Amino acid sequence: MKLSSPTLITTFLMSMAGSSLAFQPTSFLANTSTKYVSSTTSTKSSSSSSSLSMVTTGSLNCRIIGIGSAAPKTLITNQDLESVVETSDEWISTRTGISQRRVLIHTENNDENVEKESIKTLASDAAQQAIIMSKIDPLEVDLVIVATSSPDDMFGDATSVAAACGCSNAVAFDLTAACSGFLFSSVTAGQFLDNQGNSYKNAVVVGADALSRWIDWDDRNSCILFGDGAGAVVMSANDAEDKESTPGILGSSQHSNGLGYGKLNCVYKGSPKVVATPGEGTILSQGSYSRLAMDGKEVYKFATREVPTVIKEALVAADMTVDDVDWVLLHQANIRIMETVAKRLGIPMDKVITNLAKYGNTSAASIPLALDEAVRSGQVKKGDVIACAGFGAGLSWGSAIMKWG
């Protein structure tokens, strides 16, 4: 049964300051642009979304019309890792659901005999596939967003990806939100396309990451989890005169909580560099980064607690219920997380899309990479409703209810 529309979302916001009590109701119309509920984040706890800000959107007037993906050629299996760290295929597969992962390998710049793979090449390949499926001219693309936390260029890869795809009329930028990046970027692109006051008609959204570059390959708890890859979609604004067109993003909800930052991060680590300025010189910091650090137990608790809630929030924003969902597509982090989320939503696992076993955790790439395979195999069909959710470093998490095609 669908919820009544417009839906009234009343949020009680409490912050203790002596004996004061703050109360703020917010009305939310499912068919309007972004509405937000803002609250005072408690500094005492990072464990619950109830004390955090939430931003939701209703339906966005755009459609997903193309999809593509790419992964590196080099494959590392669980059996391969048995010779790297103290682990086993059985231990990895039963605890994570991962059997293998694809990784980018190091190639020297002067090695002309080796085909060079990179985040840029993977992202470009995925985007080009999506553009081909969409049947639009690359010159018709107005916006390119690349969601990545591991770009080839620290200043961003989006402009290079746009150029490689022939999208010379597009504005391009990167968006960093770790494993939530593709979902956040899709909603961002949807906002551009939905706004009738601008000229954006077509957008390419790419999720691409190579966390194999940043994990500690001597740490058996993290090196078994991650792989590299890219996925992309083409989103197009609906023709306002087409009465039969339906939104591609039906509703969404996003959160973040910097109090959980220490649970999953990859922090700056500089080394001293003496610059011979007058006197004793100046000691600057020569840039580099530490290895990826993760508190697996805390991240698991965070994901299984917050993801079911944020999906329900997005369904409310879409004026829908769990019964309206054809497929659930979660960030491909751990099969146990997916099983727990599905159980808490009351959704059978045969409605959960996953390719985790083949690719591992590919961060921002995981949702579009899995969706591409599901669409091309015929598993997902035109008109299917997909509840997507991303979650990860930041901490950040969000959900979007999407209709394919």
Image (cartoon, rainbow, N blue to C red):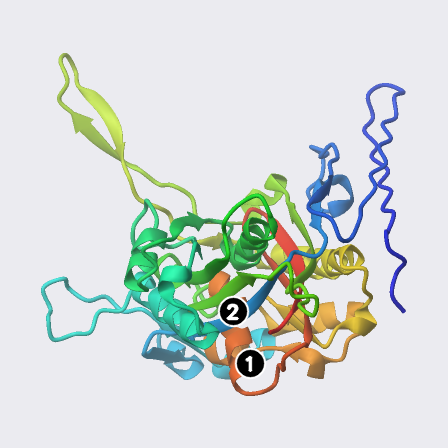
Name the residue tied to disc 2: 368
Q: Nearer the viewer, mark 1 or mark 2?
A: 1
The x and y percentages for residue 50 are 78, 44
The kind of residue tagged 1 is Val
Q: Residue 390: which disc?
A: none
Quarter the N terminus occupies: bottom right
Q: Secondary structure beneath disc 2?
A: helix
**Residue 248, quarter of picture:** bottom right
Residue at 85% x, 18% y is: 18
Name the residue tied to disc 1: 375
Relative height, residue 310 to residue 98 (above, below): above
Q: Is residue 258 left or right of residue 210?
A: right
The x and y percentages for residue 173 are 40, 48
Q: Is residue 262 left or right of residue 115?
A: right
The kind of residue tagged 2 is Pro
Which of the marked residues, 1 or 2, is nearer the chain's N terminus?
2
- Residue 221 appears in the figure: no
Q: Secondary structure beneath disc 1?
A: helix
